[in-house]
Image (cartoon, grey):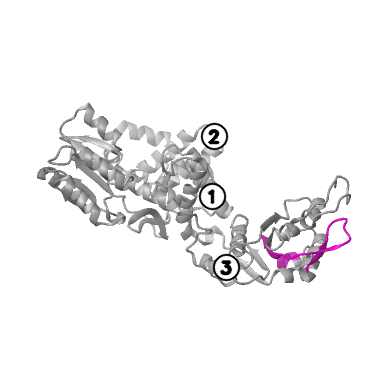
């Protein structure tokens, strides 16, 4: 992270802010007058400038407002905080009109000043992340070893036109791989045509693939080119090939064998100059054994096979994918990108995602629309994520990883348990303990059942656990347990009776 620049001719102000920010582990650089700032900006590259600029408004020579104007002209996205002991309306209006992030009157409360600088810092880092995300989006993302194997295979096939079979669960990104194979092939200048063979009725699929002549069937008013002809000179992607009707498999095999086909109702053969890439979520070997898929077609398609891993097999990619999809969703909706709290990212990373990357993308669309604030907390996640069955109390640990000097957000590290108390400076939402996350999941599960007694059920369980723990710690002495819990003797006695804890061995 770049330093926070402080500009003030008052040495005591500079000293107080430097020490306060140092305690927050925030780097600083101080200047006594605006001319020094302008000289420093002229001597350093853009990436070496300030992360945030805090400037007094009245100094010898150039004023803080003049400095604000010059800094904004050179570094428009750097937040500038203007300080002044002269709290008049004109100064405040001029500061904001000049693009100041905030206006800080002197004398100021140091913790509040630090909090303001932190907000400006968050804004600056968010802008840098947004700038990075606004560049051309990568075709595919993934640091997991299984994804790196896929990337290497695409690279090796970049000079080939061989038939490829892509396997993987639904939603794992098979079409993205097919598009990448096309883009990095000698046919890149030709068309990429995709068809989902499972989504088109059997009686229409033949015409969709091979086209038809005029009058071939009722409603065929004109000749129509099929997908094979549309993909001439390029790539035809046959998605869900395992669901193709058996009789059409024979026609496809003929095209792959001799490169010719007939339109429906046609008598002249058409040459197909097309590379075929097929994909399926099914086990084609088993389909062959079951007699549902032609073995000779299977071998024709299975020249090179690429297996795409499920998202649960590449959990280390979930943080990167989540931030990418949040950025993408914000661009599509024309809104400001939302950030995600580490605790929410932990919860997402624990989910198995049966719908794979597509489900994660949909989740990011959902929270972009539904989350009420710019920071996505655990409570903002959809019910199916919160109500995860069979999860342990050891969430995936995430840490912030700096990239090019900017904290990009949490990155997945390990499955280490997290039972230590959260740091005092952490927000309550971003430092939730495992039991709190499990409580949220339990609440979400009960609410999903449309029950009307969720509050009472969970309250009773909560109070029961607390009282039993206190009685165990005091060896059953109720008065001492009540004192430790901060409740009255009569209250604990009534609770023990209401919760039917008298039968518990620790209650005496």
Q: Position of residue 444 (x, y in %)?
A: 50, 41
Q: Which mark is residue 329?
A: none
Which numbered disc flags the more N-terminal residue, 3 or 1? Answer: 3
| Near-viewer residue (214 or 315) | 214
Is residue 502 in sight in this rendering? no
Which numbered disc flags the more N-terminal residue, 3 or 2? Answer: 3
User: How far apart in space, not on screen, are marks 3 and 1 (Cα)?
Assistant: 23 Å
- Name the secondary structure under disc 3: helix
Residue 265 in the magenta stretch? The answer is yes
Magenta extent? 259-287
Q: Position of residue 100 (x, y in %)?
A: 28, 38
Residue 306 in the magenta stretch? The answer is no
Which residue position holds label 3? Answer: 154
Q: Which mark is residue 451?
A: 2
Is label 3 or label 2 in front?
3
- Name the secondary structure under disc 2: loop
Which residue position holds label 1? Answer: 361
Q: Position of residue 270 (x, y in %)?
A: 81, 63
């Amino acid at each position: 992270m770049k330093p926070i620049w402080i500009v003030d001719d008052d040495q005591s102000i500079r000293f107080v802010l430097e020490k306060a920010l140092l305690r927050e582990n925030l780097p600083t650089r101080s200047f006594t007058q605006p001319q020094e700032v302008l000289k420093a900006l002229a001597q350093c590259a853009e990436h070496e400038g300030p992360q945030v600029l805090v400037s007094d408004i009245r100094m010898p020579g150039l004023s803080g407002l003049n400095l604000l104007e010059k800094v904004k002209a050179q570094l428009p996205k750097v937040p500038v905080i203007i300080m002044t002991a002269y709290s008049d309306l004109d100064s405040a209006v001029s500061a904001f009109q000049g693009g100041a992030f905030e206006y800080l009157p002197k004398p100021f409360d140091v913790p509040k000043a630090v909090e303001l600088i932190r907000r400006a810092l968050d804004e600056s880092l968010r802008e840098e992340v947004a700038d990075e995300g606004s560049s051309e989006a990568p075709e595919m993302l993934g640091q997991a070893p299984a994804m790196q194997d896929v990337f290497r295979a695409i690279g090796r096939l970049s000079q080939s036109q061989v038939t490829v079979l892509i396997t993987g669960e639904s939603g794992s990104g098979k079409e993205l791989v097919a598009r990448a194979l096309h883009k990095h092939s000698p046919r890149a200048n030709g068309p990429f045509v995709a068809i989902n063979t499972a989504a088109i009725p059997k009686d229409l699929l033949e015409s969709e693939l091979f086209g038809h002549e005029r009058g071939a069937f009722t409603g065929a008013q004109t000749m129509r080119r099929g997908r094979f002809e549309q993909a001439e000179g390029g790539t035809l992607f046959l998605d869900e090939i395992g669901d193709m009707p058996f009789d059409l498999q024979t026609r496809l095999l003929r095209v792959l064998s001799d490169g010719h086909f007939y339109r429906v109702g046609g008598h002249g053969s058409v040459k197909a100059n097309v590379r075929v890439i097929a994909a399926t979520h099914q086990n084609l070997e088993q389909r062959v054994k079951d007699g549902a898929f032609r073995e000779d077609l299977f071998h024709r398609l299975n020249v090179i096979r690429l297996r795409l891993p499920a998202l649960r097999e590449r959990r280390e990619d979930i943080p990167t994918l989540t931030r990418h999809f949040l950025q993408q969703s914000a661009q599509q909706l024309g809104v400001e990108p939302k950030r995600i709290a580490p605790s929410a990212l932990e919860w997402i990373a624990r989910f198995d995602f049966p719908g794979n990357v597509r489900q994660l993308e949909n989740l990011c669309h959902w929270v972009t629309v539904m989350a009420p604030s710019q920071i996505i907390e655990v409570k903002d996640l959809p019910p199916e994520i919160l109500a995860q069955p069979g999860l342990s109390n050891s969430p995936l640990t995430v840490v912030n990883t700096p990239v090019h000097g900017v904290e990009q957000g949490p990155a997945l590290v390990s499955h280490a348990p997290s039972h230590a108390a959260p740091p005092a400076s952490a927000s309550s939402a971003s430092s939730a303990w495992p039991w709190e996350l499990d409580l949220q999941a339990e609440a979400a599960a009960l609410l999903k059942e449309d029950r009307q007694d969720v509050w009472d059920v969970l309250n009773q369980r909560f109070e029961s656990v607390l009282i039993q723990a206190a009685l165990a710690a005091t060896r059953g002495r109720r008065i001492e347990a009540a004192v430790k819990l901060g409740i009255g003797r009569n209250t604990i006695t009534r609770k023990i009776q209401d919760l039917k804890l008298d039968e518990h061995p620790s209650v005496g």
